[in-house]
Amino acid sequence: MAGRFNCAICGADALEAIEGFAELPRVTSDCKPWPAGGSMNCCAACGAIQKLPDAKWFGEIEQIYRDYQIYELSGGSEQVIFSEAGVAAPRSKALVDFIAANAGADRAGKLIDIGCGNGSQLKRLSAAMPRWRLYGSELSDSVGASLRKIPNFVELYTRPARDILERFDVVTMFHALEHMPDPLAALRDAAGLLNRGGRLFVEIPNAAISPFDLLVADHLLHFSPDHLGYLASRAGLSISILRDDLVPKEITLLADPGGELRARPAPAATMEIVRSNVAWLAAMLTEARSAAGSARKFGLFGTAISGMWLYGALRDKVSFFVDEDMSRVGNSYEGIPILSPAQAPAGSTVFVPLLPEVARRVAGRHAGSEVAYVEPPSRD
């Protein structure tokens, strides 16, 4: 059992530690290596996956956020997502189009983005919804000057959501809820900011699909669609849309105030998934170390979460990164260059730390080159 900490999703005193997780190196949400030593728990009552908001975790996130630099390797440009053919597009485009369509882009309104970061989503929302007044909420005013340059931006709040007196037609939370120590209170506070008829939008990683989300040290919660829907209903929200296909490996929620409590998710499936995913990550780490040990020159594919996680485990073995995101190519991390696939040295080995089906497509795109692309183990 996990002591005095109850499940952050259902409230039960039923958390069970996941064996083997503490031995895995980790990574931060701004894609920097982080050492092993974390804990992972699963609720025996509902199956929700979570870390513990204890003194150790708070100490770590204080360190992480002290030097936090989102999208550092791409010069502040947001992460792109790739189609099956390898065509890149900004991650937020589909999300902003979705919000604009459901909020009414042609009408006037007020929108606040909770956990607005450097304002990348607000910039796109400003372009897509030019008649809307935009607001942000963050822990500090460190990004205030750049936010105020966004057309239609009105104010940045640095106080808790429950203390904001203004009311809004849309409240957005892009990749914020998974960081919050009390997600139930966070959703209730966000819903409390809505005008009558207002809507709440939440976007988070889908831990049921992406094992790599477990490795993010500052992500406290690791959601499946069922667990997000259940938590939202506990917060008094009625779910209009809950889907996992708008952005790959992410969950999209659109909700309105008022609604009935959903049935608590069954725990068995999620508990099996998290144990299987931890074992798969450990197996990938073993295979990557083996590939690095036998390679004449070794590189890693990607400089986002999974690539930087493996780099933290293999540092002195890595000679270069390969990335298809051209905003990152030409940069370096800790002196290690980031190359395009065409620049990868002939005769080198590149390990692809992605889901097997995605890694297979990557290796297929570059088949015939003089570089050996090594895929991760299967998840069977």
Image (spheres, rainbow, N blue to C red):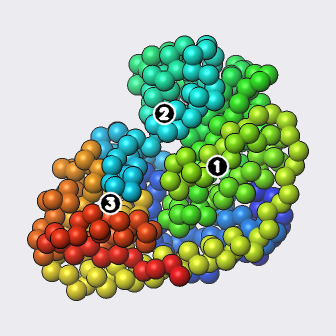
**In this view of the protein, which residue sits in the foreground, 187 or 56?**
187
Residue at x-position 46% and y-position 37%? 93
Which residue shows up at 25% across the image and 47% down it?
A: 326
Question: Is residue 357 at least partly visible in the picture?
Answer: yes
| Snapshot quadrant of residue 227 | bottom right
Foreground tag (3 vs 1): 1
Q: Residue at x 42, y 59 (%)?
A: 305
- Between discs 1 and 2, the one toward the N terminus: 2
N-terminal label among 3 and 2? 2
At mark 2, the secondary structure is: helix
Q: Residue furthest left?
A: 346
Residue 56 position, x and y percent, is 60, 63
- Element on which disc 1 rests: strand
- Location of the N terminus (image quadrant): bottom right
Q: Which mark is residue 205?
A: none
Q: Which residue is mark 1?
A: 243
The label number, if any, that marks residue 121 in the structure image:
2
